[in-house]
Amino acid sequence: MKVAIDLRRIGNPGIGRYMKCLVEALIADAPQFEYCLIVPPAHQDAISSNGHSRKVVSQLKYYSISEQILLPRLLSREKVDLFHSPHFLVPLWRTCPQVVTIHDVIHLVYPQDLPSLGGRLYARGMVHAAVRLSDHIITVSEFSKHDILRHYDIDARNVHVIHSGIDERLSRVENPNEIAIVRRKYGIDREYILYTGIYKERKNHAGLLRAFAKLVQAGVSGDLVIAGPLAEGEAKLEQLGKELGIAARVRLLGFVPDEEMPALYSGARVYGCPSMYEGFGFTILEAMSCGTPVVCNPVTSLPEVAGEAALFADASSPDDFAAALHRAMIDESCRAELRQRGYANVKRFSWRRAAEETAHVYALALGASA
């Protein structure tokens, strides 16, 4: 049976990581299917193919009208038995059974995540279509499944929770020289609290700055380091830092290459995640994998993913979040316990297991269509 997987967004720093890691695991651990990998020209080397997979390079533009005509033609031409969209977009003209991954419904809860009215309407319409036109839905957390079922009247038996994995190559950097090189590159010369991710209101960078300001007022030394593309958020955070009197202690690094992230995580005293909404929460697992104590907001999927390996504190309260950060910074017994619990927690998440469970969903969809 031939399964086509739409990887046209594999270059995206968020969804692209899910696509790349899942497909690599499927190719390695679920060889019962033949895979047709639809890849964009600019990123056709982002993933390798083998004897039971091959790449089809496509210039189809994502979020376009033309893809709704040309993608079904491509699936028909390739004689595809099943189509999997690892994002929310599926062909409105079905040529075969369909499986879709819906990571979350942030566009319904935080519509401001999408800057334009047209983008919000498009996302709302396409997710609605994906839910109705797909035989099975994969999502990445029990929280997201609950949220999907809260917004859409569909059969819960067709919504499957498959946790994402953690890249086994992402682990603690023990060599202090490697950490020192990355610190020098970004001008980090003191102990630091780390937060990573793109700028969105729901990510609550502002809440973290307010909590950090409380730490500074209490005389705690160290800096706050924020990694990830911030776009228009950079000016907002710089202004907030000035208003709070902590501008000199906040370092906004912008995009950091993947190969430098293990050292950046490993060098951090604490990883602080104040996000108000996450469908999964990759970064807290990445921090734990690198042995960094984690403090996070006890909302949405974060408690599910962090398990018992994080300190939880209300990120809407600067005082509460600051107190948890402070404890994770200075309490050595707490830090040691969080580190060991973190290492144990990440073992719950495996791309190999995700691939096996995804292949099972494929079999369900193909069996239902037989």
Image (tube, helix red, strand yellow):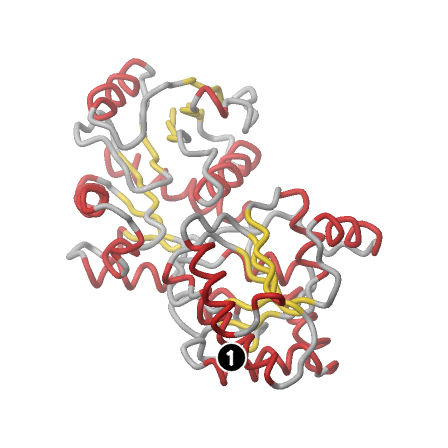
Quadrant of residue 336 within the rendered picture: bottom right
The quadrant in which the N terminus is found is top left
Image height of 64 relative to 320, above or below: above
Residue bearing the label numbered 1? 321
Image height of 205 relative to 183, above or below: below
Are there few (<14), some (14-19), or many (20+) residues within 10 Å of tag 1? many
The front one of 71 and 353 is 71
The front one of 83 and 116 is 116
The quadrant in which the C terminus is found is top left
Q: Is residue 359 left or right of 69 when viewed as pictured?
A: right
Q: Residue at x 73, y 50 (%)?
A: 182
Q: Residue at x 23, y 43 (%)?
A: 119
Q: Is residue 92 left or right of 220 when viewed as pictured?
A: left
Q: Residue at x 18, y 56 (%)?
A: 152
Q: Position of residue 67 (x, y in %)?
A: 25, 24
The front one of 33 and 24 is 24
Image height of 92 relative to 114, above or below: above
Image height of 360 relative to 337, above or below: above
Q: Residue at x 17, y 44 (%)?
A: 125
The front one of 288 and 260 is 260
Q: Position of residue 44 (x, y in %)?
A: 50, 22
Q: Is residue 270 left or right of 56 when viewed as pictured?
A: right
Q: Secondary structure at mark 1?
A: helix
Question: Callout 1, which amino acid?
Answer: Phe
